[in-house]
Image: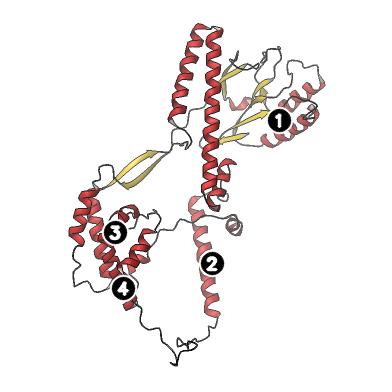
Amino acid sequence: MCITDSDSGLTFICVYRPKPSKVNKYPISDFLQEFDNLMDEVSFMPNKLIIVGDFNVHVNKPELPDVRHFHDTISINGFQQHITVPTHISGNTLDLLISRPDDNIVVTHSVKKSLISDHFLIEFILAYNKPPPKKVTKTKRDFRGFDPTSFTQDLKCQLSEIPDSLSSADELVNHFSVVCTKLLDHHAPLKTRSLSIRTRLPWFNEDIACARRVRRRLERKWRKSQSEHDRTCYLDQLHLVNDMITSAKTEFFKTKIASGDDKDLFRTINTLLNNSNKQLPVYSSSDIMSEQFSNFFKSKTDKIRRDLDAVVMPNYDIDYKIEGDEQAGHRLNVFEPTSLEEVEKVLVKLPNKTCSIDPLPTWLLKQNLSLVVPIITKIVNVSMCTGNFPTTLKNAIVTPILKNRLLIQMC
């Protein structure tokens, strides 16, 4: 397992070599070959490296050929193995800590008896500061003190009568947007906050939190008394917490997979496999990269326009004849006005997704359907009768999702 902290440029590699058996049929020669390949690859990495793990190689016995091979691989690639004392109850050194001497990353290290394993615990201090939490600045409306009843009353007063002077779709949309924005600024004003980005575990619950507190209390009690009874109680609670976490994770992902659509299914699988699609090509400057994206999309749009201009479209007559109708044809030149009921049905079915340029959040719009349906219906009918789509509604915030094919084309 390899984990890299991109902020500090420190890479952690954890290695586990299962003990050879008749079941896995994994001889040490195969492991040494794979370890040689790993060291050849990581030796060229510019990052500072820490390699740890249970290697199951008796490095305390340098006279063995396989151990000499292992030591030679480490030294030839410019690394150092720090652990020189036994790390197993049998007296062998199996768990290792490896780094480059030039990195000066390992300050101190020690080996202590483990509480629950036949392997000992390796503790080490690195010349490495904990990265500060990433912070983002967001401007959002503060709905914590929001009073929906008061907002509804004010909205009713503002939208009770639509001025007769508003005759175009643009004027109606602007009126609706100004009224809603003014009321939101009063009841839920915009606030700018600096937020720390923290990973939230959706499966974590209060029962697990309580069990973890009990586990910590039992661990402190055992460390103080060193009695076998307290150790047994601590281990039982430790296994209980682990089982609760496994069960909560399993239930969470089972429910998520069963209740979601195909898109949610693939997103969940990518989460479980730690796959991320948010990858960018290698670049040296963000300005150059953004310019490349701009040029790529502009050229693609220009090509689509040229292709459309080159196509000769047939001239279709909008007159058509209905079979069995005595009339020669019908002309579609008038739209039937929509009704309040039709608009309300459409609004009710809207998902609770909201864009920052929307006059009202979708959930708040649904709570005030009786007040907003009349003006939205009038906007639709005026737009259809005049053949003009409101200018402000042509704006959108688009967040592109980069596909692998797109990145290949850009590169």
Q: Mark 1 = which residue?
A: 77
Looking at the rendered image, the disc whose residue lies closer to the viewer, 1 or 2, is: 2
Residue 368, x across and y down, in percent: 27, 56
Residue indicated by mark 4: 381
- The answer to which of marks 3 and 1 sits earlier in the sequence is 1
Q: Secondary structure at mark 4?
A: helix
Residue 97 in view of the camera: yes
Q: Which quadrant holds residue 372? A: bottom left
Residues under labels 2 and 3: Cα distance? Answer: 41 Å
Q: Pointer 1: residues within 10 angstroms few (<14), some, or many (20+)? A: some
Residue at the spot of label 3: 369
**Label 3, residues with CA under 10 Å away: few <14, some 14-19, many ≥20:** some
**Relative height, residue 365 to residue 234 (above, below):** below
Name the image quarter holding the N terminus. Answer: top right
Please name whichever residue, 127 or 196, is drawn nearer the observer in this view of the structure.
196
Marks 4 & 3, CB-CB < 8 Å contact: no
Q: Residues within 10 Å of mark 2 (few under 14, many from 20)?
A: few
Q: Residue at x 26, y 63 (%)?
A: 176
Q: Amino acid at mark 4?
A: Asn
- Dot 2 or dot 3, earlier in sequence: 2
Residue 101 in the image: state x and y as whole percent.
63, 24
Q: Which one is nearer the viewer's eye here, 403 or 102? A: 403
Badge 4: residue crowd in 10 Å (few <14, some 14–19, many ≥20): some
Return the disc, 2 or 4, that comes first in the chain's sequence.
2
